[in-house]
Image (cartoon, rainbow, N blue to C red):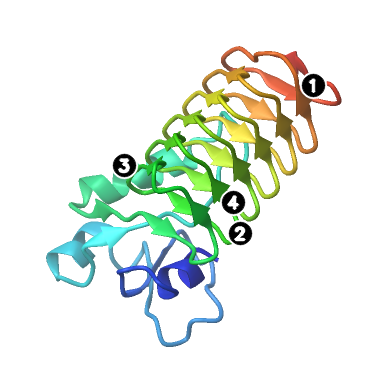
Amino acid sequence: MVADCVRSGNDYVLAGFFTMGDKAVSGFDDVPVYNEKETSAKSLYERDVASHFVIGMGRLTGEDHIRDTLFATGLNAGLSPAKIIAPSAVISNLAEIGEGSVVFPMACVNIGTVIGRNCIINTRAGLDHDCKIGDGVHVAPGATLSGGVKVGEKSHIGLGASLLQNIKIGKHVTIGAGAVVTKDIDDHQTAYGVPARAKK
């Protein structure tokens, strides 16, 4: 899906995929697939194959560090993080989206909302006015954040979760799928259920 977003309406040309291990990439036979055993992000930059990067892998929990590792790898290689927004996403002109973040199809980002670097705002996710989203956050498909919600860095908001207005979510938090969050959640906790209850 990230590749589709890159190809549809953004100011980038898809130069290739960089995979981990022997993972296959299907559906884009015209684009080179680079395996870490064959090359590195740095060598692609030095050969003028690529100038920017974007990460297609999501954050599964608030304690999942793979996006952070891959983001650092891209930066250390000399590449610049690309900001990718699907054409069907609705983004207020008064919202801010950080470098390396991806906004998927039919997501909505409302006025005054600020999204950090290296985030995913997934399909049909809704972020209402004046939300503050820290670096490395993943808002899963169909999740809804009411106005004034704050989410700390590297947290994961699960599929279809609902966060009431002005809720504060800490750092490295996991909100379970379908949860309804009515109270603030502290750092490094997991919360699920209706209403959501946190556990360390």
Identify which amino acid the numbered label 2 is placed on: Met
Amino acid type, mark 4: Asn
Q: Quadrant of residue 105?
A: bottom right
Marking on residue 106: 2
Badge nearest the viewer, 4 or 3: 4
Q: CA distance from mark 4 to mark 2?
A: 9 Å
Q: According to the image, label 3 marks what residue?
A: 72
Residue identified by numbered label 1: 196
SS category of the residue bearing label 4:
loop
Which x, y percent locates residue 81? 30, 51
Amino acid type assigned to the residue bearing label 3 in the image? Ala
Earlier in the chain: of badge 3 and badge 2, it is: 3
Residue type (three-letter) at the residue carrying disc 1: Ala
Image quarter where the N terminus lies is bottom right
Asked if disc 3 and disc 1 are in contact, CB closer than 8 Å, the reply is no
Nearer mark to the viewer, of 4 and 2: 2
Distance between the Cα atoms at labels 4 and 3? 22 Å
Q: Mark 3 or mark 2: which is in front?
A: 2
Q: Mark 4 highlights which residue? A: 122
Q: Is residue 197 left or right of residue 163?
A: right
From mark 3 to mark 1, how far is it between C-alphas?
33 Å
Measured as percent of width and height from the top left, residue 87 is found at 48, 66
Mark 1 and mark 2: span between their CA atoms? 26 Å
Q: Nearer the viewer, residue 37 or 4?
A: 4
On screen, residue 156 above or below 200: below
Residue at (47% x, 27% y) in the render:
153
- Give the Cα separation between the discs numbered 4 and 1: 21 Å
Rounded to the nearest angstrom, the CA distance separating label 3 from label 2 is 29 Å
Q: Residue at x 54, y 65 (%)?
A: 88
- Say whether marks 3 and 2 touch (CB < 8 Å): no
Where does residue 6 sit, x and y in percent of width and height?
A: 41, 68
